[in-house]
Amino acid sequence: MLGACVIFKQLFSRDVRVRSQVGFQPDRRGSHPYLGIDFRTLHAHAESTGSIPARRIRRLFSFQRHLLSSRFLRGAPHLNPLHILDEDYCGQAKCMLEKVGSWNFDIFLFDRLTNGNSLVTLTLYLLSHYGLIELFQLDMVKVHRFLVLVQEDYHNHNPYHNAVHAADVTQAMHCYLKEPKLAKSLTSCDILLGLLAAATHDLDHPGVNQPFLIKTNHYLAVLYRNTSVLENHHWRSAVGLLRETELLSHLPAEDRLTMERQLGSLILATDISRQNEYLSKFRTHLDQEDLCLGNASHRHFILQMALKCADICNPCRPWELSKQWSEKVTEEFFHQGDIEKKHKLEVSPLCDSENNSIADVQIGFMTYVVEPLFAEWARFSDTRLSQTMLGHLCLNKASWNAMQPEASGSSEEPESEPEPSSRALPQGSLQS
């Protein structure tokens, strides 16, 4: 555990703004062998290699089943005898959606009940729940096409950064939008942007982090000049789908451009290397008690903080859910480390499975990233939900501590870690 905590201290003691001098120099552009590997196959299992036809068949069945479920929700009759199974699953999914505002919402179960369509189903439900489809006069065909394309642009071979994670963040965002301070202040445009940003915040994530892209001189790192590489890509990908589907084409051009810029501002806020910047600004506002949610810029800032919380809220979920997310994100880290070893690259911090454990990584992440952020969020929104999240965070951290090999011999050691209220927040995270 001490090893991982030291790594987090080193990573987060300053802004992680990796420039071109890290890794390969610009004059070696395109020379690294890793650049020839398709990111979409990074986390693919060996047996799935070359099974493109089978994957297409599964996607066809998935889409067909989603259409059947949609017909059932609308009360339309079915045309084949397989509808009984679909009705059963669809009925259970519908029951779950009635409790979509619960912090205990099991996104893994919901994804199974919707046959892998959790992001489409959940986001579509929330857009309807808030009355946004009618208010913004959105074309349902375009809405559905946009959400399907968003879901398909997530790499579901990624253990963590996939469409289920996006659905989970969207559900968490909904929970925050329901909080009293936000519910009475946010405009419909704010809510629409918040949901769209949550659904697309990791769009087309390659399953490796920014330093990896930079040191392999990947074209995205070159394109975005090594600054918020992934976040810029997620934003631009989202805008591309908005324009491709013409979802907002009926709005005035100036309004569309404004919404695209604001969407980018929200997604860029999830860059964990800028954590200190946002957290310090949040603390200053809270200390000075000058947040005015009647002010559009203040509302937008709170939306940024809400999305940041939603993005890394896994340690604040109930243990049964939090543990699954921890295992998935660590699997993704370690897979990156294996790739780095294979290609003779320096192994990124926390990505070496031989020197780190899931417990190591999670305890460090909770201590230096999650606790400080959620402590400040609780200052802003001191509600039952905030206290519930902090309670789960404390219990989950204790559970990981108990799994440490040395826990039985030095149980007092974890208590010496900094408290969540510490003003010195380490910077950066491999979860970006």
Image: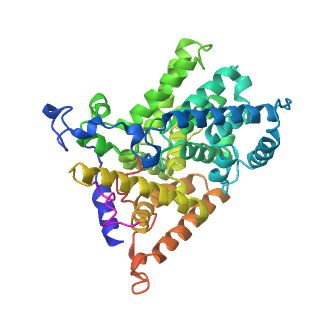
Q: Where is residue 231 in the image (x, y as percent from the top left)?
A: 41, 37
Residue at the location (58% across, 31% down)?
193
Count of marks placed on residues: 0
Q: Is residue 100 visible?
A: yes
From which residue to which does the magenta span run? 348-357
Residue at the location (30% across, 40% down)?
213
Q: Residue 353: within the magenta?
A: yes
Q: Where is residue 351 in the image (x, y as percent from the top left)?
A: 33, 57
Q: Taking 261 as reference, is 94 left or right?
A: right
Residue at the location (62% across, 57% down)?
382
Q: Residue 398: within the magenta?
A: no
Q: Is the magenta stretch mostly helix, strand or loop?
A: loop
Indicate whether 222 appears above or below 269.
Answer: above
Q: Where is residue 186 in the image (x, y as percent from the top left)?
A: 64, 36
Q: Taking 327 as reference, is 38 left or right?
A: left
Locate the N terminus and report the quarter of the image it occupies: bottom left
Q: Position of residue 350 (x, y in %)?
A: 33, 59
